[in-house]
Amino acid sequence: MEIQEELDIMNLTMTEVFEQTCKRFPERNAVCFYGQELNYQTLFGYASRFAAGLSEAGIQKGDRVAIMLPNCPQYVIAYYGVLMAGGIVVQVNPMSVEREIEHYLSDSGAKAMVAYGPLLPRIAGAPSSANLVKKVVVELPPANNTYEDGSVGFEAFLAGASSPAPQVTLSPEDLAVLQYTGGTTGRSKGAMLTHRNLVVNAYQSFMLTGNNGEPERMLTVIPLFHVYAMTVAMNAAIYSGSQLILLPRFDLEEVLQTIKETKPTIFPGVPTMYIALNSHPKAQEYGISAIRLCLSGSAPMPVEAMREFEEKTQGTIMEGYGLSEASPVTHFNPIEKRKPGSIGTPILFTKAKIVDLGDGTTELPPNEVGELVIRGPQVMAGYWNMPEETAETIRDGWLYTGDIGRMDEEGYFYIIDRKKDMILASGYNVYPRDVEEVLYQHPAVQEAVVVGVPDSYRGETVKAFIVVKQGATLSEEEIISFCREKLAAYKVPRLIEFRSELPKTAVGKILRRTLRDEARKEAVN
């Protein structure tokens, strides 16, 4: 890479990237949503009007604006409109309940909100929603509704903006997004992502695709409020002048039909999506093999599920790694030399190492297990209004991920588990992923997750939750016997629970914590 190009990337804001792309490719299709298409010129016009509307409502540089929408064109317009107005986007999961919405609004101090119409009653249940100076409501399909609480419809808001987009001076260090983490260790924390964080990570992500200069078509069913889709799909597409093919939810038949009709070139997905595609008897007939890159992130991809998908569809899955605090991408399996089961090597501008699980100050040699720490321009500025948590997570410029992993002799990294998910059985460390990889090798297992539950003798014992493939049968004894052949005795699940489905986040990640809490409560009772 040229040094000048590197400097340019480091010194751009996300609004400059957006404006440059819209001017370079005005006629290119930017967004496709159920057959409706917006080109870049039109998208820029809408985002500019949205920014003007926010400015007229009193939104100034640094003010926070919450977005609580499913995947739709209005999301893209609102996101870039907020940034053009100098605002900071607060990402809110549309599945959030009143208590969670209240936390996002009160913690961020949001002054305005863009929300999906059916969610208004839930938002009204959050006391801090009364402090919002403006609520813009998206209806799908668009509708000219009037709202008793003074909210304004999205189309009316755009139409009512009379002034040009505000001319706001932004720097790469300015905050662009508050990306709230899942809150698995307590209340959800707002990762402060700057314009530089987002621009660099969009650039890093797109460079990984091996693109030859042609625009891509990105099938985006992972939700845009999630940091993975925000960067790897939306921002990377905007950076490169590519097209976003948006779907608001993962419906297997709809996804397959969309692949057949729109012929996407890149599909960012999560393991549960690929496992679902494996279960479809005719998935290969929809043209999945024509997708140039199937990306997998957000959770570890079981090696057996990857192999099954690739054999069945002739598609190729490339696995990466990231976290909200790093915008999110930090590692990727190189296209030219992939190692299944590995998250690959650190991406451009990024350093990583494995440190001891004690105080985290000693770097460990290859194949030693420890905590993964990361350094790079995509690492967040810190947690919003949480200096102590920031100091604990970012030390001497290194981001402590909380993930346990190892690095091999060739510099490829492997995630073994979350630090907090480790099971201590009879004094031995059991990493759930080790056990899950074995469970996925059983031909009757569709999904599996492993947790630790209290045990008066062993301290903790291993429990497996399993979804059996349609048409297959499986017993506890079969699973335990299967695991005994492939695992050390202390790792073998002693408790098996069969479920018709496993709880998941909106992005499709299995909620291990929910299952662990259920299992522990049951064990205590």
Image (cartoon, rainbow, N blue to C red):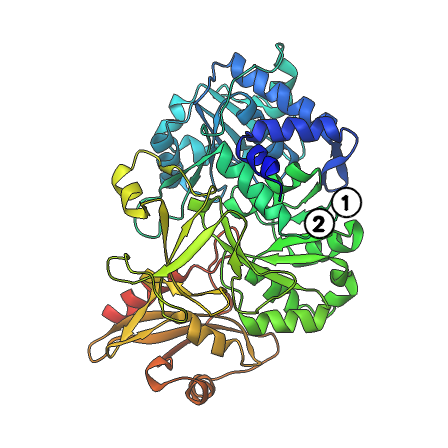
Are the residues flagged by discs 2 and 1 in contact, CB closer than 8 Å? yes
Residue 224 appears in the rendering: no
Residue linked to disc 1: 214
Q: x and y percent of residue 502 in the render?
A: 48, 64
Q: x and y percent of residue 204 in the render?
A: 57, 46
Residue reaching furthest top? 163
Disc 1 marks a residue whose amino acid type is Glu
Q: Residue at x 64, y 55 (%)?
A: 251
Q: x and y percent of residue 404 in the render?
A: 37, 63
Q: x and y percent of residue 513 in the render?
A: 37, 59
Could you give the CA–CA distance between mark 2 and mark 1, rounded to whole angstroms?
7 Å
Disc 2 marks a residue whose amino acid type is Asn
Query: Relative to residue 48, is residue 366 depicted above or below?
Result: below
Query: Relative to residue 460, is residue 177 depicted above or below?
Result: above
Q: Residue at x 29, y 37 (%)?
A: 386
Q: Secondary structure at mark 1?
A: loop
Can you say which quadrant of the picture contains the N terminus?
A: top right
Residue linked to disc 2: 211
Which residue is nearer to you in this view: 450 or 382? 382
Q: Residue at x 53, y 26 (%)?
A: 83
